[in-house]
Amino acid sequence: MDDLKAADGPFLMQIVDVFSIRGRGTVVSGRIKRGKVRIGEEVEIVGQGEPRKAVVSGVEMIKYRPDVEHPRGMVGLLLRDVSQNEVGPGMVVAKPGTVARDANGALILDE
């Protein structure tokens, strides 16, 4: 998928790491695979169980440091009313209704 097509698709980000910021909430980090997300937008977290809706209350580009192993373009999303134990690596954050899991647990993407 070329960069222009990826930018136009519905938002999709695979979660790589999760951490909590005291007084702020839960941050999920990863690389945006396609689309865009803005503060205040509703997103869906898709993992092992039922998809869970959340609201993005902060977006930050994580600075690239060559001495730390993470891909360029990492983004942190601060999610409202989501606890750290509800999300984890391998789950995805997406535009609501665009991602599901089949009976075997594989992601089904609505492109």
Image (tube, rainbow, N blue to C red):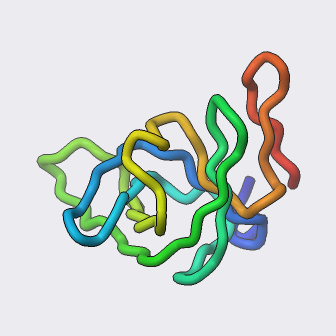
Q: Is residue 77 left or right of residue 99?
A: left
In this view, which residue lies farthest toward the top?
Answer: 104
At 17% from the left edge and 46% from the top edge, which residue is drawn?
68
Q: Quadrant of the C terminus?
A: bottom right
Residue 33 occupies quadrant: bottom right
| Residue 109 x %, y % | 81, 45
Closer to the camera in the image, 36 or 8: 36
| Residue 47 x %, y % | 62, 36
- The answer to whether 42 is drawn above or below residue 65 in the figure is below
Closer to the camera in the image, 62 or 46: 46
Q: Answer whether residue 104 is visible to the viewer in this image.
A: yes
Q: Is residue 71 left or right of residue 111?
A: left
- The answer to whether 94 is drawn above or below residue 100 in the figure is below
Closer to the camera in the image, 81 or 105: 81
Q: Answer whether residue 3 is visible to the viewer in this image.
A: no
| Residue 92 x %, y % | 60, 46
| Residue 72 x %, y % | 37, 57
In this view, which residue lies farthest toward the left?
Answer: 67
